[in-house]
C-alpha cells in the first residue's frame, strides 16, 4: 500500500520475442510507440497475439504482412488506460529495430519499449496520457538513469523509418502529465 492506495499489479502476458540485454548495459531510455492492428483498429487481442507470436495473419488481409515477424514491447497501454506487460524490464524486447539515440545504436539494448494503442488519425485518450506518464515515472524510479529527456518516440530513434507515436501524441501534454503523477504504485516484472 502507498498513500492509502493498493498497489496496482500490471498483468504479465509473456512474449517469446525477447533475449538478454548485453552484459553491463544499463537501462537508460524509454521509447514510446503507437500500434493499431489492422490499421485503424484498436483490438487488444490482435496486438496481444502479435506480441505473443500466436497471431493468425490470415484473418485480415492487412495482417498478412506481419507473417513471420517477431516483435514485442515491454508494455502496452490500451485506449482505456489499462497497462499490460509482455517482457520483463531486465530483458531485451524487440521494439525499436534499427535505431540510434544520441550516437548510441541498437536502442533495444538499453531501452524499455512502451506501445500505446493508437494511430496517426485518432487522438490518444486522457487515460493513456495519465497511465503512460505514471508508468514512465515508476520506471524512472526503478531505473534512475532514465530522465525526462530520455523518454523519446520511435520516430526520434528511427527517423525516416518510423512515424510513431506520431503527430497525434502531444508531447507537451505528456510532459505536463509526467509532472502531475502522484501515485507510483504500479507493480511490474523488473
Image (cartoon, helix red, strand yellow):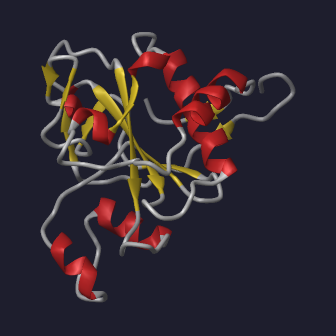
Q: Which one is nearer the viewer's eye here, 175 or 187?
A: 175
Judging depth in this view, the residue of 115 and 70 nearest the camera is 115
* In-image side of 9 versus 44 (left or right): right
Which residue: 24% across, 33% down? 157
Give residue 125's position: percent from left, percent from top: 64, 54
Answer yes or no: is residue 19 visible.
yes
Name which residue lies at 63% across and 52% down: 81
Residue under the point 18% across and 45% down: 160
Can you say which quadrant of the picture contains the N terminus? Answer: top right
The number of numbered discs placed on residues in the rendered structure image is: 0
| Above-or-below relation of 96 to 103 | below
Depth order, front residue of 110/31: 31
The x and y percentages for residue 74 are 38, 42
- In the foreground, 33 or 135: 33
Q: Check the image and name the residue furthest to the right.
A: 4
The quadrant holding residue 54 is: bottom left
Q: Is residue 9 visible?
A: no
- Answer left or right for 121 relative to 5: left
Amino acid at each position: 500500500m502507498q498513500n492509502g492506495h493498493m498497489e496496482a499489479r500490471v498483468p504479465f502476458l509473456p512474449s517469446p520475442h525477447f533475449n538478454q540485454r548485453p552484459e553491463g548495459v544499463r537501462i537508460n531510455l524509454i521509447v514510446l510507440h503507437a500500434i493499431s492492428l489492422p490499421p485503424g483498429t484498436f483490438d487488444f487481442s490482435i496486438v496481444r497475439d502479435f506480441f505473443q507470436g500466436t497471431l493468425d495473419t490470415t484473418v485480415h488481409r492487412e495482417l498478412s504482412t506481419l507473417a513471420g515477424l517477431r516483435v514485442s514491447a515491454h508494455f502496452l497501454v490500451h485506449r482505456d488506460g489499462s497497462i499490460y506487460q509482455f517482457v520483463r524490464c531486465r530483458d531485451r524486447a524487440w521494439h525499436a529495430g534499427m535505431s540510434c539515440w544520441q550516437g548510441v545504436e541498437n536502442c533495444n539494448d538499453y531501452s524499455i519499449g512502451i506501445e500505446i494503442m493508437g494511430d496517426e488519425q485518432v487522438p490518444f485518450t486522457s487515460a493513456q496520457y495519465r497511465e503512460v506518464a505514471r508508468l514512465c515515472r515508476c520506471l524512472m524510479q526503478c531505473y534512475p538513469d532514465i530522465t525526462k529527456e530520455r523518454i523519446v518516440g520511435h520516430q526520434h530513434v528511427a527517423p525516416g523509418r518510423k512515424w510513431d507515436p506520431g503527430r497525434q501524441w502531444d508531447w507537451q501534454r505528456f510532459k505536463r502529465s509526467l509532472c502531475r503523477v502522484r501515485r507510483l504504485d504500479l507493480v511490474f516484472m523488473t
